Amino acid sequence: MGAAWSAGAPVSDNELAALAAAGDTGAFETLAGRYQSLMYGVCRRITCNDDDAVDALQESLIIMWQRIGSFEGRSAMGTWLFRIATNAAIDEVRRRARRPAQAYDEVLDRAGPDDVESAAVLRSTVDWALGRLPPQFRAAVVLRENYDCSYQQIADILGIPLDTVKSRISRGRQALADLLVPSYGSGD
């Protein structure tokens, strides 16, 4: 079955989902390949850790395989997979909550004159700050700021009301500002 669709014209996400639900592993691999990078990016930004992001991505792909038959096409495939990846990343954050956090001072001590190193320190600092947000705030902020999702898309992905999305983003942004401004805004 897979050979017929792979040699022809491009197949839609919904068609691939139907084929995958019927057991076509090639269709599943194609569909997963289309979204794997995006799913990893969501997992990485929410977990703030490469290893945790890989674990969350693997969990996302397992869930995707297990639930592909339940995908009804009412939302876009990307929205459905954002939800899966976001939830897997939040679960990973919760599982790893007992891991000791990297000291903030250690991150700042690595700053140097080299722009590449400074960019890495900035990324580490932002990851550090994101890592301090409650997972539900972190997910909303990441989807909005890093993936430019609309408030309605975020509501659909997270399965929460629109007003809750707005509140989480606002509170998450304020918490980030409170964490980052003392470091960068003091002029010291």
Image (tube, rainbow, N blue to C red):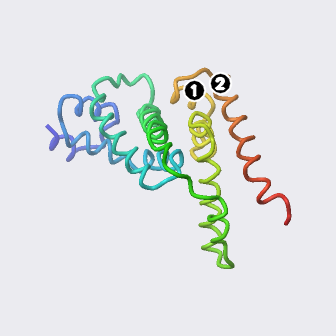
Is residue 1 placed above or below 146 in the rendered structure?
above
In which quadrant will I find the C terminus? bottom right
Residue drawn 59% across and 43% down?
A: 142
Q: Amino acid at mark 2?
A: Thr
Say what secondary structure mark 2 lies in: helix
Q: Quadrant of residue 162?
A: top right
Left or right of 171 on screen, residue 84 = left
Residue 6 x/y as whole percent = 21, 45
Q: Which residue is mark 2?
A: 164
Above or below 44: residue 169: above
Q: CA distance from mark 2 to mark 1?
A: 8 Å
Q: Which mark is drawn over residue 155?
A: 1
Q: Which mark is residue 62?
A: none
* Foreground pick, 96 / 3: 96
Where residue 154 appears, x then y in whole percent? Answer: 57, 31
Asked if the residue at tag 1 contacts the one at tag 2, i.e. Cβ–Cβ closer than 8 Å, the answer is yes
- The residue at the far right in this view is 187
Q: Residue at x 62, y 64 (%)?
A: 107
Picture residue at 43% right of the left edge, 44% below the top: 39
Amino acid type, mark 1: Ala
Kindly state the secondary structure of the residue where label 1 is placed: helix
The local crowd at label 2, few if under 14, some if 14 to 19, many if 20 or more residues have their Cα within 10 Å, is: few
Q: Residue at x 57, y 57 (%)?
A: 102
